[in-house]
Amino acid sequence: MALGAEKPRSASFATLEIRENENLALASLALRRETVEPQPFGLNLPGPGCWVADNEVAVFWTGPDQWMIEAQGRYEEDFAANLKEQATGCAVTEQTGGWVAVEIMSVAGTEPIEALLAKLINIDLADFGPGRATRTVLEHMTCFVIRRSETHFSVLGARSFAASLWHVLEIAAKRLEEKAA
């Protein structure tokens, strides 16, 4: 686990749940010059600010002609090799071990999760609905934020910052809970 425990870390609050996602495989995909844009695992590669998912595989845009491909439950596989078969001629790099994924879910609608994110990141949440993803800064850490549904966000941060990222998210969630009480 990125957070150093034998089991993935999780925390529950009155309206929010936060958990380390230890089963997420990641690989980056970049087009090489004159390469036809592939459809890995049947997915159309999204444009800037977008995220698409189907059958436990998802993809989000990270830069011009660059994407991050996610595969839930495939952490133990050589996911990059599987992706390379799907994206002939593209540059594919294994990313799983370099990142920590933290899932944030609201058990009380969109308000608690949006209040948490409004405290932590500079994103216009009115224009950040499901299917959106962006790179941003959370405290001093660069990360990706993905809105998987109205009530489910993911934060992907560098594995070297895993403990700091967890701490920031947990403290902010605790403070929101105390403020609501």
Image: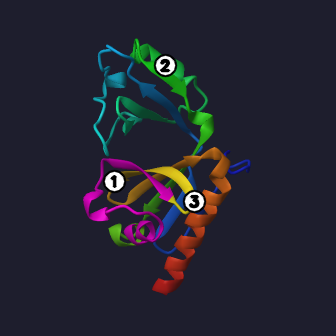
Q: Secondary structure at mark 1?
A: strand
Looking at the image, can residue 67 be seen? yes
The amino acid type of the residue labelled 2 equals Asn
Residue 125, above or below 82: below
Q: Residue 14 placed where, x, y %?
A: 50, 75
Label annotation for residue 140:
3
Residue furthest toward the bottom? 181
Q: Residue at x 56, y 39 (%)?
A: 23
* Residue under numbered circle 2: 82
* Residue 119 within the magenta-colored segment of the rendering: yes
Left or right: 34 with respect to 164?
left
Question: Callout 2: few (<14), some (14-19), or many (20+) C-alpha neighbours within 10 Å?
Answer: some
Quarter of the picture containing the N terminus is: top right
Highlighted magenta segment, given as a residue range:
114-137
Query: Which of pointers 2 and 3 indicates the residue nearer the eye?
Result: 3
Q: Residue at x 55, y 49 (%)?
A: 157
Gap in angstroms between the C-alphas marked 1 and 3 = 26 Å
Q: Quadrant of residue 58?
A: top left
Mark 1 and 3 residues: CB-CB less than 8 Å, in contact? no
* Residue 91 within the magenta-colored segment of the rendering: no
Gap in angstroms between the C-alphas marked 2 and 3 = 34 Å
* Residue under numbered circle 1: 149
Which of 132 and 105 lies nearest the eye of the viewer?
A: 132
Gap in angstroms between the C-alphas marked 1 and 2 = 27 Å
Of marks 2 and 3, which one's residue comes earlier in the chain?
Answer: 2
